[in-house]
Image: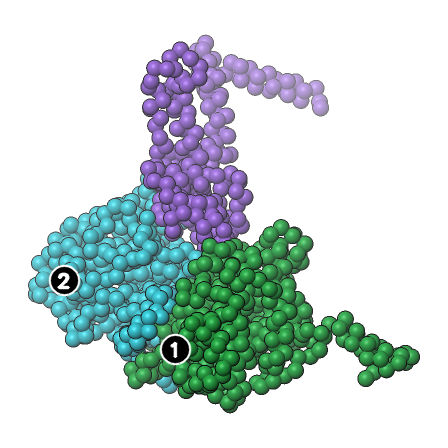
Chain colours: A green, B cyan, C purple
Amino acid sequence: MSSQTGLRVPLGRFGWCAAVLAAAWLCPSPTQSVEGAVPPKGDHGAATMDYQLQVLATLVPKADVSQAPKGFDPVVWAAFVPKDNEPNDKRVALGRKLYFETRLSRDGTVSCATCHDVTRGFTDQIKVSEGVKDQHGQRNAPTVLNAALLQVVFLDGRSPNLDHQATQPIINPVEMGMADGAAAVKAIAADAEYQKAFQEAYGRPVNYEDIGRAIGAFERTLVFIDSPFRRFLEGDTKAISAEARAGWEIFNGKARCVTCHQMNLSNPLGTDNRFHNVGVSARHQDFESLAVRALKAFKEDPSEKKLDELALSTPMSELGRFMVTKNRSDIGAFRTLMLLNVGISPPYMHDGSLPTLWDVMDHYNKGGEANPFLDGGMEPLALSEREIDQMVAFLFSLTDVRFAAENERQFAAQKAAAAKSRAFRDENMASRRKLAFEDRSEGAKGSGK
Amino acid sequence: MSSRHISVETRYIEDRQQVFGSLKNLDRRSFLKVSAAALAAAAANGLVPPAAFMPVSVAHGAPAAKEAPAFRFAYISDSHLYAKDLNDRFARALMRAVDDVNNLDPQPDFVFYGGDLAQLGQSHELDLGAQILKNLKAPLKIMVGEHDWYLDMGAKWRSLFGEPTYSWDHKGVHFVVLMSVVEKDFWTARGLTPMQRMQTVAGLDNGVQSSFMVGTEQRTWLEKDLAKLPNNAPLIVFSHSPLYKLYKNWNFWTDDADEVQAILKRFDRVVVIHGHTHQLLTNRIGNIHFHGLLSTAWPWPYAPQGMPELTIQMSRPDPFNPNDGCGDGEVHVHADGLVDKIYNLWNRNPITVAKGYTESGGKKCVPPKPNRPGY
Amino acid sequence: MSPSAKVLAVAVTCAIVAGLVFGCAEEGTRPSAAQTPDAIVADHMAQWKARNPDRANPWVEEEKQRHKIQPSADNADVLKGEQAAGQTYGNYTQRDVLVWARETEKLVVEGSRIFHNAGRLGGTVGVSCDMCHPDAANTHPETYPKFQPQMGRVALLRDMINWCIQHPVRGKALAPDSPEMRALEAYIVAQRKGEKLDYGKH
């Protein structure tokens, strides 16, 4: 155990320990942590459940869960709470327990917290999530932070609310892998603690839908909207940097992000809760043939479970909202991602294909990827490098202050990665020297008369 | 720092073109059907709020399957091109339409272009349009619009595309293309330059210009052209302006519409397909069924007066999506000459105005009502 | 200068002056029409008009010929009533009413000129407002103020005008009190004369 400075300082053993602990606590830590220590890792790269619970305790303040979270419009909040699941301490406690419950997975290694890790921005900060038997799905895990404020759950909106959504990963074969709801219930029903908790929370024995409700109730306490940006909006002009302020202007002006990433006091999330094809999924497949295969699969098995399975484990996942509505206008469309806390939830987009926010800006700057279903709002923006930096600074200012350390770390890491490689950048497209559909329309030159 | 970076997508474009070439694409409409069982299962769970699950029959108002059309053609119209470096949006939109039509499988019999290829009739604009349209796989049939004509009175148009008035037969249907945007001379007396004349005509609401007409010469030509056809012959007439009197202020109008309709009166049924109006428009006057074409460039609002009863308007376009209200489409021609008109609105579900709709005077195959009515 | 040249110069000058003073008097003792004050003014006016074609022409009438513009209220009602007889306040005349109409019309017509001109809007892509809004159709000014989520705030008509100028028209946003903005608002509002105010309507 050498000292940080490398000097030979005459300290006793106790002195050394104290010095090291003090140094570790004072110096910037590599990950979100409680006392400057690196989080102990459990299965699938997530921090251990116990460690996460410790961190969680420091993040979520004691509050009256039956009231709207601090700073949130109570009238709008009431609309988000389902009538059959009014929050109270018992339900939240049960939900918290279930969120970390690895017994709900087939091999006992996966819980919600595996992919929605408290120490990793309540997501897993990897491209696509890893579930039981180390299988990978097709989608990037969105953050659970503020998920309660979304109108539409899952990136293709196949779940009407949070309570329902929580039940889906449990029975998905590549996520938690339980055969069905009954198997999930069986895994915990024998536990007396759970029996008691369910009775107290819902007045019913352990059942699958209540598992979802409880987790939903817990997730409703995870409201993290206290960002430097919000403080800026509330009047503290010094809360964000000049760069970020400039980014905010661009966000509303030249770049038109606000059109889909709507941010206002009634809806601070930075999403319109609608589905847009911005061309991410068009990067590597042919939609038409995918849609045909999807419809064939539905003919054989039209259940919700099948939809969930298909969404995550086949290339049909790329069809997005179309998988749910079969609307042609929804082909390749995914829900607008939330911007709050975006800094700590890389990589980005529904498939995690964009590693940094600079890559995200490059994608939008060139007007996305041309495809027959591209949203008309996608246009080349001709943003300069400076403007992109300002936008990114703004985006990083949207992270709740409780995650400031992680946010800083991410900013540095993403900046370094972006300095090395900007794979999605295309200056010709961004400045409109080359047009989006030019290649595609010219690629199929015909006789034409 | 700039041009060294080529995006990952450029490589994928080559891959994808290979894929397109080798995969057999399927007819869009055939796979876009509702899975009724899925809807029922979701509804039974009681977990379905209207917003989340809404399987919708994609081709609204589609006719019954047994009424298969004899053949199909695609259409693109009203692109109003400027030079690419002045305004890239309109060029991009036309390229998108070409891409759409090229992706149809099976390919349509031909592609019809409805006029107003250029915005100000300038040589480079028409050249750009011709160049983009060359990329169409299917054969192209083209019609002139006022924006193409009034800079040089059609000199460039003729050199690129030939005579504006012509006809041909295809699979038993007689097609006629008219130049219906003839205007009485309003420019000589005012001493306008060609560009001033063009800019006057380019303003939809510009009252200095004259009303459109087909004119005596073309009417005579039309009568002669149709002379040999029996009354029950399938007949489709293309004209840029609607061949009826909708709204004079915006030249949604043909001065001699009555005379032209009189020439067409003897036929059992005639279909007139027109551009210029940039919107979903349906009308029926006696034996004539009128259908409007979408624009790739921008949508027009509906006229404050004179709207045909049969028209069920498209939802008011959303200004925050520059493509909304624009698109291209297909026309499915039946053996009797009547058509199903398919409006492929970008970012919206397609809308079909089936032959049954105009045939029944608006009672059957009714297209869906708009959510956002116009003002 | 030589003496003969001097004499020649003087003679020529006298001749010129004489010509100027008396030249047209060959026709009679009265000055001709070309020399009356009215004629001189008219001549100056013609020269000024040639130098300032835009401001000189009857631009209001020209614009009204090009585009249908709703007339402003005629205010005939204020000429009626009995209370104002013999007073200063509330006592309006036909001329007042005419001036109100004329001045209002000028701003509205100016708005129409800007509305239909991509250059004056500051646009860089050749797009003017009338390309989506002929005769200001579909501008529905009676529905403002309304919350526009895509702008993140409650929009007034001028906010939407600026949004359109920045995006489809691709120009610089106008200052809310700039003469162009005021004229545009005036024209757009005028075209919806008679429509009921229905603010907040989407």
Disc 1 to disc 2: CB gap under 8 Å: no
The 10 Å Cα crowd at callout 2, few under 14, some 14 to 19, many 20 or more, is some
The image position of residue A180, as x and y in percent, is 40, 84
The image position of residue B343, as x and y in percent, is 29, 64
Q: How many marks?
A: 2
Nearest the viewer among A177 and A363 is: A177
Quarter of the image holding residue A348?
bottom right
Q: Is residue A112 above or below residue C1?
A: below
Quarter of the image holding residue A371?
bottom left
Residue at the image position 57 percent from the left and 68 percent from the top: A342
Label 1 sits on residue: A287
Q: Is residue C5 above or below residue A18?
A: above
Chain bearing tag 2 is B
Disc number for residue B204: none
- Amino acid type of the residue tagged 1 in the rendering: Phe
Residue at the image position 36 percent from the left and 84 percent from the top: B23
Q: Quadrant of the N terminus of chain A?
A: bottom right
The image position of residue B214, as x and y in percent, is 22, 52
Q: Is residue C53 above or below residue A402?
A: above
Chain bearing tag 1 is A
Query: What secondary structure is found at the residue carrying circle 2?
Result: helix
Seen from this angle, which residue lies furthest right? A10
C-alpha span from label 1 to label 2: 36 Å
Disc number for residue B359: 2
- Amino acid type of the residue tagged 2 in the rendering: Glu
> Do pointers 1 and 2 mark residues of a single chain?
no
In the image, B345: left or right of A119?
A: left
Determine if residue B291 is in view: yes
Residue at the image position 33 percent from the left and 73 percent from the top: B45
Residue at the image position 37 percent from the left and 86 percent from the top: B22
Nearest the viewer among C130 and A69 is: A69
Nearest the viewer among A431 and C3 is: A431
